Amino acid sequence: MFEGFWVFPLLGIVAGILAGLLGVGGGLVLVGALAWLLPLYGVPQEAAMHAALASSLASIVLTAASSAYAHHGRGSVLWPTVKWMIPGLLLGGWLGSGVAVKLGDQTLRWIVAGYCLIAAAQMLFGKPRRNVGADSVIVPTGVPMSAAGAGIGALSAVVGIGGGSMTVPLLIWRGVAPVRAVGTSSACGVAIGLSSAIGYALHAPAGALPHYAVGYVFLPAAIGVAIASVLAAPYGMRLAHRLSGTALKRVFALFLVSVAVALLV
């Protein structure tokens, strides 16, 4: 029944390695690839972007949880910050998915393509993270973090990512050490993926996808990608220590530009 779905674990391996290698960008690659692949599995063309976004976000729940668990073991998750951000992240993810469901396929393609270009520009021209000691104990909390979470959750839901490309710079700007910013962002990604995926499942019209789906979440893609990406991410982290990070980011930035172009062609 599920023959031919082997391509989703392969895609998960690629996304997992990229996430481990670069820390960001895996979700954008997933969305671009799924938008192209899902129509081959019976997903209507007009629902392809919605299904790609929903399935990517559903897979992020397991991936982010695995990453957050690993970072927690190293003491790199600022749980007080996470607690303040979670209400906003949950609300933003729910509202963002509700808005995305009402947008047309082509509009979503333009939005995701635009975000790909912004992420590529950040990789190519962004300044290095400011040097904050790993033993820094700054813990941002309060209503401003909840408000920021709402914005991050909403935009992440619309472009199908875990929010790391927004959460990490925000926390570093607030004075958090980069290693703790990444760990905290991983925990936030669980909330974003969960609320957004549930939103895409419940906001979707009845019979949005023909089979193997809950709302817009195409289960073979979400499950296959999630399991494989969790297994592959550690290998990406190992490669990150052996390869030039600057060169990799430049190559991946160009790859994101190609993803943006492919979405619009």
Image (cartoon, rainbow, N blue to C red):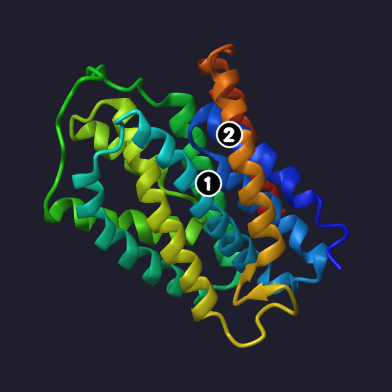
Coordinates of residue 198 in the picture (x, y in percent): 48, 71
In this orientation, which residue lies closer to the viewer: 78 or 106?
78
Which residue corresponds to mark 1?
Answer: 63
Tell me if residue 100 can be seen.
Answer: no
Q: Amino acid at mark 1?
A: Thr
Query: Within 10 Å of the Cα at label 1, are there few (<14), some (14-19), or many (20+) other Cα atoms?
Result: many
Which residue has dot 2 on it?
A: 233
Q: Give the camera-side residue of 230 and 254.
A: 230
Question: Is the residue under label 2 in contact with that under label 1 (CB below 8 Å)?
Answer: yes
122 and 180: which one is in front? 180
Residue found 35% across the figure and 20% down from its top: 128
Look at 58% across and 56% down and name the residue there: 56
What type is the residue that disc 2 sits on?
Ala
Task: Say whether residue 49 is visible.
Answer: yes
Where disc 1 sits, the SS reads helix
Q: Is residue 223 left or right of residue 24?
A: right
Looking at the rendered structure, the secondary structure element under dot 2 is helix
Question: Is residue 200 shown above or below 31?
Answer: below
| N-terminal-most mark, 1 or 2 | 1
